[in-house]
Image (cartoon, rainbow, N blue to C red):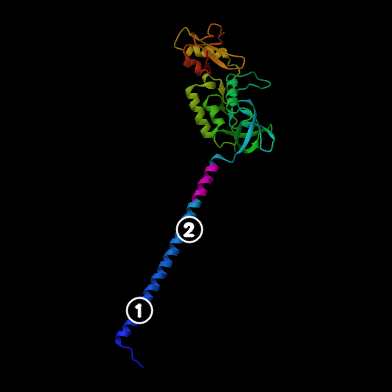
Amino acid sequence: MTTPTYSTFFKYVFLLISLCAFTLTGCQEITDDLSEEKSTEETNTSTKENSLSTDQVSNESKGKTFTAQIVRVVDGDTVKIKTSNGKQETVRLLLIDTPETVHPSKPVQPFGPEASKFSKELMPAGSEVEVETGIGERDKYGRLLAYFYVDGKMVNKLLLEKGLARVAYVYAPNTKYLDELEAIQKQAQKEEIGIWSIENYATSKGFDDSKTDKGTTEKTTEKSSCSNPNIKGNINSKGDKIYHIPSGQYYDITKEEEMFCTEKDAVKAGFRKSQS
C-alpha cells in the first residue's frame, strides 16, 4: 500500500478549502438574491398602497357622483334629470339661489332670465351632467339636493362667478363647498356684476322685488360719467338683455328701457352687445 506524500496531502487540503469557499459564496449569492427580491416586493407594495391612498383622497375631495341626462332646466337653480334607471328627478342646486322666473306668486326678477338662459345653454336637454348629491339628499319638497358638474366644472360655482346667483340656503351638514362658494361670491360682489350691479337687490333674505329696471337705470345713470348717455338697453321677448350703440343697425328703431354712457356700463348691468 502506497503512503500519501506530503505533496498529495496538501493538494487534498487545498481542494477541500476551495470547495468550501465556493459553497459559501453560492449561499451568499442566494441569500443576496432573496433579500433583493424581498426588498423589491416591499417597495412595490408600498408604492401600490400610496397610489390607493392618493386615489382615495381625490375621490373624497369631490365626493361620489353619478351621471344623469338633462330633461330640462326649470330655472337657473332647478333642473329635471333622468337617471340611468329611467327615473326622472327634480334637482335643486345646493348652496345657491338664482332670481325667480317661474315662481307662482312672484314676478320675473331681474337677472332671473339671464340665470335661466345660462343654465339652459350650459345644460341643454339631452346632455349629460355629473351629479354629486348632498347629505340627506332631499329638501322638504322632495327634490334632490346636489352639485352639478359639466366638463369637470361645478355649475353652482359658475352661476356665482357670473353674478347670476347668491350663496343661500346654508344648512348643516350640507356645507362642504361653502368656503369656496363664498369666496367666488365676494369676487362677483367686488366686480359688481349681475345681481350685484343693483344696489341692495340681493340680500341675505332673498331678492328685493322692488328693485325694478327703472331703479337700475337710475343707479346706472347716477354712476355714469356723462350727462347724456346714448347707448340703448333693451330686453327682448325672450328676456335677453341687449344693448345697441348709435352706429348699430337697429339703434333708431329700438325702444330703450335703460340708457348707458359706456358699453362697459351696459355689460356690468348684464346686457350683451347687439350682433347687428
Q: Does the magenta stretch include residue 59?
A: yes
Q: Is residue 27 left or right of residue 119?
A: left
Q: Distance between the residues labelled 1 and 2?
A: 39 Å
Residue 5's disc number: none
Q: Residue 44: x percent and y percent?
A: 48, 55
Badge 2 density bin: few <14, some 14–19, many ≥20, Cα 10 Å: few
Q: Please tell me whether residue 14 belongs to the stretch shown in magenta.
A: no
User: Which three-letter amino acid code belongs to the residue tagged 1?
Assistant: Leu
Residue numbers of the magenta segment: 50-60
Query: For this rendering, which residue is in front, 198 or 231?
Result: 231
| Neighbour tally class for label 1: few under 14, some 14-19, many 20 plus, Cα within 10 Å | few
Residue at the disc numbered 1: 15
Residue 216: percent from the left, percent from the top?
A: 54, 14
Q: Residue at x 29, y 85 (%)?
A: 7
Q: In this view, does 6 lie above or below 208?
A: below
- Residue 140 x, y percent position in the rendering: 68, 33
Q: Is mark 2 on a helix, strand or loop?
A: helix
Q: What residue type is labelled 2?
A: Glu
Instruction: Report x, y in % for residue 244.
Output: 52, 11
Secondary element at tag 1:
helix
Q: Looking at this view, is 269 or 67 the one in front? A: 67
Query: Could you tell me which residue is drawn at 63 percent across and 35 percent down?
Result: 68
- Give the residue at x 30% y 86%: 6
Residue 91 located left or right of residue 177: right
- First-in-chain label (1 vs 2): 1
> What residue is shown with label 2?
41
Label pair 1/2, CB-CB below 8 angstroms: no
